[in-house]
Image: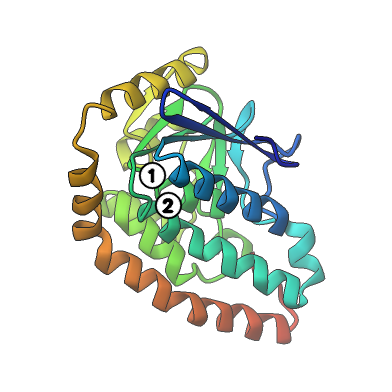
Amino acid sequence: MKFESVQYSLRDEVATIRIDDGKRNALSPSVLREIYQAFDQAESDRAIVILTGRESVFSAGFDLNVMKRGGIDALRMLRAGYALPARVMAYPYPVIVACNGHALAMGVFLMLSADHVIGCRGEFKIAANEVAIGLTVPRVAAAMLRHRLNPAAFQRAVTVSEYFDVETALSAGFFDELVDPVDLIPCAEARAGKFKELNLRAHAASKRRIRGALIRRIRLAIPLDLLDALLKGLRGGRPR
């Protein structure tokens, strides 16, 4: 199955969802819609998921062109993006992210919603750069960063928009492991093979137990973050 910017393939109960818009994997309304559709298909297939990007980039975040235009399209994009981590965290089978390179802003928050995150070595940057560009970090973003990062890294990521290289991203908690680029997909496939050995019913129930409060908090935060974005737009700024 192939959409315009997202590719879906299924083999041996493992679904690979690859985001590739040919550029920076901006999370536009159409890309977000395709990601949702791919996860729906994977769930229908009862598949473990490997979510990955294209060469040198996982995702650079929301589509800035849509942001600059503002209006209802931008708000709909924000709503879909902010809701996506909750969708992924609640997915009933293991989700592995194979991060190909740079991950910024909403790309980071999507990455952190997985059960296991594999980074690859290279001159790549991982950052929630909202404060650096003059924005208050959204509540959803802060919740996702707190969910994964160690306390000191969380403070730096949120308050000073630290750009982490891949080694410091590993120690901060963005990644669970770090491999050479050539080993990224083979490693993800090997992890998926091991995860098949889990009792997947227990896996799903355990995720619901430990993430239920966080998922509810994210869903409650979405309208507040959208209101913030709307007010900022009315004041002449644009949400990122």
* Residue 105 in sight from this viewpoint: no
* Residue 176 numbered mark, or none: none
Q: Residue at x 38, y 44 (%)?
A: 114
Residue 109 image position (x, y, % from top left): 47, 53
The residue nearer to you, when weighing 190 against 217, is 190
Residue 44 image position (x, y, % from top left): 46, 45
- Which quarter of the image is occupied by the N terminus? top right
- In the rendered image, the vertical position of residue 230 relative to residue 124, given as above or below: below
Q: Residue at x 70, y 59 (%)?
A: 29
* Residue 88 numbered mark, or none: 2
Disc 1 on helix, strand or loop? loop
- In the rendered image, the vertical position of residue 151 relative to residue 233, given as above or below: above
* Coloring applied to the structure: rainbow
Q: Residue at x 48, y 20 (%)?
A: 185
Kind of residue at badge 1: Ala
* Residue 1 in sight from this viewpoint: yes
- In the rendered image, the vertical position of residue 181 relative to residue 140, given as above or below: above
Dot 1 or dot 2: first in sequence order is 2
Relative to 3, 185 lies left or right:
left
**Front tag of 1 and 2:** 2
Residue 154 image position (x, y, % from top left): 34, 55
Disc 2 on helix, strand or loop? helix
Furthest residue to the top? 182
Residue 193 image position (x, y, % from top left): 32, 22
Categorize mark 1 by other alpha carbons within 10 Å: few (<14), some (14-19), many (20+): many
The residue wearing badge 1 is 114
